[in-house]
Image (cartoon, helix red, strand yellow):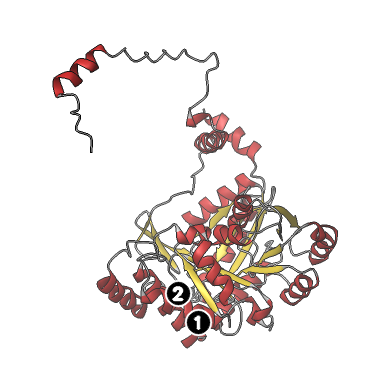
Amino acid sequence: MSSEKGPDLNNLLDMMRKAPAAPSTPRLQPLAQNYDTAFESLPQYQQIKFQREFARYADLNVPYYRMHAGRSSATAVIGNREVVNFASYDYLGLNGHPEIMAAAEQALATYGSSVSASRISAGERQPHRDLEIGLARTYEAEDCVAFNSGHAGGVSSIATFLGPKDLLVHDALIHNCIMVGAQLSGATRRNFPHNDLDALDALLTAERPRFARCMIVTEGLFSMDGDGPDLARLIEIKKRHGAWLMVDDAHGLGVLGRTGRGVFEHQDVDPAGVDLWFGTLSKSLVGCGGYVAGSAVAVDLLKHHAPGFVYSVGMPASVAAASAKALELMHREPERVTKLAENSQRFLARARAKGLDTGDAWGFGIVPVIIGETVRTLVLADKLLEAGFNAFPILPPGVPEKSARLRFFINATHTPEQIDAVVDTVAALLDDLEGVSVQSILKNSASRT
């Protein structure tokens, strides 16, 4: 060990005083170009602003973020007034069911309001597994994983299974989460015309050989149109082209099939032919979140690599317990599924008898009434609410141009009288709105100013 003494404090201070000064930081000169950092200038915000200004000028009520009071199911309270509700997807009428509330309250008392960690670290709770086991059995799958967001579940699944060397092929009307997942994955994305499986087959024949892996994605019951695919043929196509098949049956669970198990039961198809069953807990299962059911390996991969699962807090145990109980009730009380089908078929038959355009809807849970013109659709929704019925207008880009519509979610607890009344009211209002267009509304607004 050296016997030399280091400099004492005074010497150190003296050295610091004599040290050359650090070079001063050069003053940054302003750049010649002025960068736009205003959020207001973003085209998305400009579109929102235009819509609001147009609605104000045309004296139209914007239906977005309208406050509801209390629980919404077959009826809702809007502006201190109870209306018949066709805008909520509580298909089986289970929202607020005493057994579901009790299950949620018990889990809340046991586990608290949050699991306070990602499930991969310290957030795993028994209600998560109870829900996942129940869903796996419903689809006759080996396992299932539940996400705390349906959208994140779709995005993360695509991003986990596909990469830049792969191909994603989807129905043109697929949900947004699939397209966002494709962007995140870097996979090449192609779409085929809605439910056109000949076009899908031709597309895969031309393009599949250029890619390492391929996934086909469709919906079991399309959320904007109320129709669905030929599942047996899809399975045949995916096998022939060496692809995975993912089916988003978010709106099919609890709605399609004799016991509500979804599109595979509705079409009497072996669910094992589908590689990934994707869905959400917010509809028939009256919770919040999403899930993917499939092989044990696929689920294991998602649990360790899906970013929306690994890097997110686990679903609250109370939500998992509520949805698990709703799933149990769906299986225990199939008469709810039967009643939903009866109500839906009644709505569809009466709407078509009145000459309303319902597209290719199957008449299970979702029935659109296609208006076409955006402003006319907004006016119709507003007048329908005045008449005591809540149905939400769906406008481009949510649907293709010139196909604006009112979307009706049918509920197992709607009465025949409510269904008949809303269809008759829509038909009568449409007759009164025959000449309504953007031009006519602007002309009337100008005459008032």
Picture residue at 14% right of the left edge, 19% below the top: 10
How far apart marks 1 and 2 lie (CA) works out to 8 Å
Q: Residue furthest bottom?
A: 332
- Label 1: how many Cα within 10 Å (few below 14, some 14–19, many 20+): many
- Which residue is at 71% across, 54% downward? 165
* Cβ–Cβ under 8 Å for marks 1 and 2: yes
The amino acid type of the residue labelled 2 equals Gly
379 vs 13: above or below: below
| Secondary structure beneath label 1 | helix
Answer left or right for 147 relative to 126. right
Label 1 belongs to which residue? Answer: 336
* Most foreground residue, 440 or 325: 325
Image side of residue 234 versus residue 395, left or right: right
Closer-to-camera residue (163/422): 163
Which disc number belongs to residue 1? none
204 vs 396: above or below: below
Q: Earlier in the sequence, mark 1 or mark 2?
A: 2
Q: Residue at x 25, y 12 (%)?
A: 18
Answer yes or no: is residue 236 visible: yes
Q: Which mark is residue 93?
A: 2
> Is residue 339 visible to us here?
no
Q: Nearer the viewer, residue 110 or 306?
A: 306
Element at label 2? loop
Residue 176, horizontal then vertical, whole percent: 60, 54
